[in-house]
Amino acid sequence: MRRWFFGPGSLLTRVGMWFLGPMRFTGLEHVPRDGAFILVANHISLFDPLIVGSTAGQLAGRLVHFMAKQEVRRWPVIGWLATQAGVYFVRRGEGDRAAQRLSLELLASGEAIAVFPEGTRSRNGVLGEPRNGAALLAMRSGVPVLPVSITGSNRIIPRGARLPRRSRVTVRVGEPFLLTRQASGRIDRQELAAGTERIMRAIAALLPPAQRGRFG
């Protein structure tokens, strides 16, 4: 897994956001300086992985691995840069099992990964219903969960716009926490759902009230 472009890519992102922003960030002191952790965040824009990686990751001295679908490898320029920036890929159809295996391997080796619990972008900026993947990884691995919120990135290229627009983007990092570890055996559905709920409420606490959805 090549990683050399993560640092330069993060710098380019912050420079780009200087023109599109400004971009503000708080709470970087909460990012663990060593050891594995799972960064969890809301998802409102295609820019979010770049923004989160360049702030809660690179500015805090950590490389954060993002997961992408295998097809991204074939995208011109972007696909190649992703392979050089610590992105790991899963094939359609293998889905959750492949993602879980690769993610747990990275966490076991002391790396940091990022997960968007909603699984897709929110079209209106409000927290949507989550999937259980982040909670499952946290309970299997026993590593800290780091909540992060992003606001404003969805206004850079709003629906129907052809050109980017300036928008203040804010990244807030909360305090890490642990879910009860269960390294093997079947995880109780209620415990898994409770873990997911705690993750979403930790993200919501960092968002403006209007974006918290039912987790406010």
Image: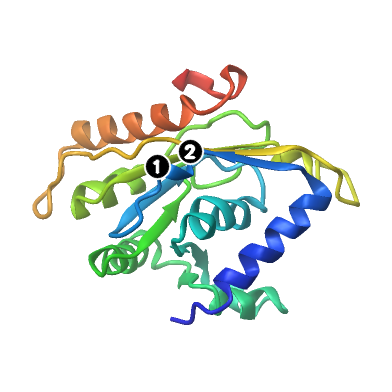
Whether label 2 touches label 1, CB < 8 Å:
yes
Q: Residue furthest right?
A: 162
Q: How many marks?
A: 2
Q: Position of residue 69 (x, y in %)?
A: 52, 67
Q: Kindly report the distance in space between the C-alpha atoms of the residues bearing marks 2 and 1.
A: 6 Å
Graded by Cα atoms within 10 Å as few (under 14), some (14 to 19) or many (20 or more), the crowding at tag 1 reads some
Left-right relation of 146 to 67? left
Residue type marked 1: His
Foreground: 58 or 84? 58
Q: Amino acid at mark 2?
A: Gly
Q: Secondary structure at mark 1?
A: helix
Query: What residue does disc 1 label?
Result: 30
Quick one: SS at disc 2?
loop
- Judging depth in this view, the residue of 142 and 140 nearest the camera is 142
**Residue 90, how many percent across, how many down?**
44, 70
Would you call the spot at circle 2 few (<14 residues within 10 Å), some (14-19), or many (20 or more)?
Answer: some
For the residue pair 70 and 151, the one nearer the viewer reads as 151
Give the residue displayed 40% in from the left and 48% down from the top.
31
Residue found 36% across the figure and 35% down from its top: 199
Residue under circle 2?
27
Q: Residue at x 52, y 32 (%)?
A: 128
* Quarter of the figure with residue 85: bottom right
